[in-house]
Image: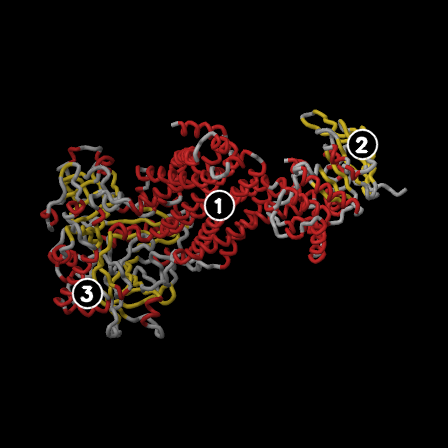
Amino acid sequence: MSEPLIKLEGVTKVFLTDEVETHALSGIHLEIRQGEYVSIAGPSGCGKSTLLSILGLLDSPTDGTYVLNGRPVQHLSLPERARIRNREIGFIFQSFNLIGDLTVYENVELPLTYRGMPAAERKAAVTQALEKVGMAHRAKHLPSQLSGGQQQRVAVARALAGKPAVLLADEPTGNLDSKNGDSVMQLLAELHKGGATIVMVTHDSRFARHAERTIHIFDGRVVQEQVESDPTRA
Amino acid sequence: MHDLRYALRSLLKAPGFTLVAVLTLALCIGANSAIFSVVHAVLLKPYPWPESDRLVYVHNTYRLMGVDRAGCSIPDYLDRRGGVTALEESALITSASLNLAGADMVPERVAGLRVTPSLFPLLRVPPAFGRTFTEGEAEPGAARTVVLSDGLWRNRFGSDRGILGRDIRLNGEPHTVIGVMPAGFYFPSPRVQLWIPFAFTAEQKSDNERGNEFSTMVARLKPGATIAQAQREVDALHAANSERLPQSRSFWETSGFGGLVLDYLAENVSEVKAMLWLVQAGVAAALLIGCANVASLLLARASAREREFAIRTALGASRGRLMRQLLTESVLLFLAGGTLGLLVALWGLGGMSSLGIDALPRGTLVSLDGTVFGFTLLCALLTGLGFGALPAWTATGGHASAALKEAGARATSGRRHLSLRSALVVTEIALALMLLATAGLLLKSFQRLQRVSPGFSQEQLLTARLALPPARYDTPEKQVAFHDAVLARVAALPGVTAAGFTSTLPFSGSNSQGSYQIDGYTVPAGQPQPHAMVRTVSPGFLKAFGVSLLRGRGFTQQDTAGAPEVVVIDRFLADRYWPDADPIGRRISRGTIPGTTDPRWWTVVGVVAPVKNSNLEAPVTKETIYFPYAQQPDSLLTLVVKTAVAPGSLIAPVRAAVLAVDPEQPLYDVRTMESRMEEAMQGRRTPMLLLGLFSGVSLLLAALGVYGVLAFAVGQRTPEIGVRVALGATRGNILALILRQGLMLVGLGVLFGLAGYFALSRILGQLLYAVAPTDPGTLLLAPTVLALVAILACLVPARRATRVSPMVALRS
């Protein structure tokens, strides 16, 4: 069996505030393989987002190891973490987090500019990503001119454009109505079918069931792993 | 009242903001008040004589000889007094430096003025007690009388009202005190402490006296009369005189002789007017920058209070009501700044005094009076309303429902506020650049001026005046003997390397000039007769004053009254009339042999370098002739002492040497030549220093403005920065992002500043010496300095942005 894409061993995260230790994560062991669609579920404050931040190299574990694509990444320097974030990780946020002053095209292009990709290659990648999410016709619009569902599609395109190893989605439907939420989940499902590895945080069990495997977290620990027999039935 | 109470509470609730805003405003408004107090006292305030705006000078002028203002002769005065109907009253005045002494008094030099009796009616100021002069007291041979100033009466005569009718000794002659002027009265300046009658002899009233212009004519226009009208009448009088006196006509025509009617106040302050307005404009720019900073702070505050306003709107407050409340706050803030600003102004005036404000014309009258208080109040109110209105209008313009929905609306209003604050910062940078460039150019101009050689050596030079009273020194022999004796004693003092006397000391505000003839030279038709600055000097003066001898010799002890009459000329005269010949041995004529009408011929024995008399900026345009004092004695001479030690240390020994020759003879106006030169440069130096100070403050305020806007922007863009970091932006990317935003503001500000500067540079050009207003060095340096300071200001928030935690940013 091949090496997992993501491997966490004994990952702990402790926050220190006013000399009070808060254990956000306690000894997390987790493996995610290439092409898997995993959802991380749990109540509010259980540590899901902290786990996603560590997976996205936005935060470092206090203890434990994190191997991404065969490489330990928990002790990397800031510039190296930025480089891996840019090349191997695609983020999809609950509140879309598009930059209001940039057009749809520029938003999708942004991570590619940080990579130093030539303009012609950037254009091709952006167009392809926008077409994939059905937003190519809105390339020149500003985010404020789009609906919430459309904004999230653009955010997905931005995450996809750099062809990352893994897509990390943090409550991607949290700010959407059910119709738009379903549409975005459908889009993620299609991406997964196309071979994308997706890790999605959600507290909505309805959406969690879209994934092949759901990891339940409570008080910073993995309390249950559940494999969905038919992820498409939700 | 409710608004006021709420505003007070609101300001006290944010003590940091209030303190920064009030201090900024106090500094800027205070500086404006201090400078306005100077502008007001020097340029705007009427003289303390009723309807002083109708006062004029009537000068003589020799336009074609380069002598624009030449005083007024007695016959010209008499013509104009009787013949110009536009003038209600006229007076002739001439300075009289007098020794005030007596049996029980230490001899003291007092500044006096010889005036026609018409002066006091002209000024319309009656004495505090006693009376002023009658026409009869201004007749030759009349009993000597004097009118005292309030200051002299109080300080020297112990406010004794019994002084009326008593005699005081002036230049050794008894003068009866007939009146004392009221407190606060002065004419023409507070330095003048007494007035004596100006008596004209029959000879002085005759046409022979024309051209002898040692006096000044002042007059009052009739109500409704204009300067142009008076000028036309003066011109008509000269035309009539020209017809009547054909022997003078040719000279008058070739010299461009005529009369010149000028506004009294404008003429007195003409030299400093442009510079003072420039300083006022500079400090006003600093005020605008300060106000923009405070407005920016108010906008930031308004942004933070958007939800509060939304709640108030939801509760039924109208936009006008909200604006009124916010305007009350800002006006209160600005008034507090203005009040504290008065203290800053008071402190600033003390500082400016040490910068030499007193040396400006009417500079001693500078004070914080009612007008300055009013100006400060107006400044605070107008800036408070003006700069408070913008944040108030913006803060109350949002939609209450959107504001109540928090995040999204906050981002939008934040962007609106950021745009406004950015516009304010661009304005600040533009103004600061204009100030910086102006101050830089003035500094460069001043430095170049300081490097100009005046034609003499001002270092280690002590100068002092001596005025011999005619009563005791009534013959040329007595005057020469006194001066010789003083020179012998002073030259023998340890530390003295050379000493001499001159009738006119350069850069002392005096000059003497007159026409002369050159042996063998015929004035071409239509050309004026040769006209020179004339000096009477002792042997040793040229050496003591450091004037370079270029050819021949200087004066010696052998150039006595009975010896062949000789002169020393400057190179300007030599080059002008003997460009290809040796001037030594040539003759010039000036005056007549005493008791005859025969011309008095003087032989040129030496040529010296030209000396600038009063203006370092202008090239020498007129020749100078030096006469030996033994052959052309004078009772009013200035002692010049070159020293090998600190000049100040020789004041007492020199004074003692003079008193050893004549115990009643005071030495006055004792100063180093360097201090005289400094005073002459004060009109440039003081405004330059002030503008330098204001441009420094402006630079600092503009940098604070840039910092404030970027810090605000970083706050606004925190979520965006988080997203960018999440997408792989490095610290360098984020630093560049924020710096780019700051540099954009700086770039725009510099662009607008340069445009504004070029638009106004023509005015500045008139105030510069040997520097073009478009001097590339300065215009490159000023934006560079500004940009560097602004980049430093950008770096702090930019570095803070790189430390934004993406986790925190994405959750915010």
In the displayed structure, would residue B609 be above or below residue B132?
below
Q: Quadrant of the C terminus of chain B?
A: top right
Q: Name the residue under label 1.
A: B424
- Whether marks 3 and 1 lie on the same chain: yes
Of residues B340 and B687, the one drawn nearer to the viewer in this rendering:
B340
Amino acid type, mark 2: Ile
| Mark seen at residue A28 | 2
- What colour scheme was applied to this rendering of the protein? secondary structure
Residue B641, visible in the rendered structure: no
Amino acid type, mark 3: Thr
The image position of residue B526, as x and y in percent, is 24, 72
Mark 3 vs mark 1: which is more N-terminal? 1
The chain containing the residue under callout 3 comes to: B
Of residues B678 and B363, the one drawn nearer to the viewer in this rendering:
B363
Report the Cα–Cα distance between label 3 and label 1: 73 Å
Given this view, does label 2 or label 1 mark the residue nearer the observer? 2
Q: Is mark 1 on a helix, strand or loop?
A: helix
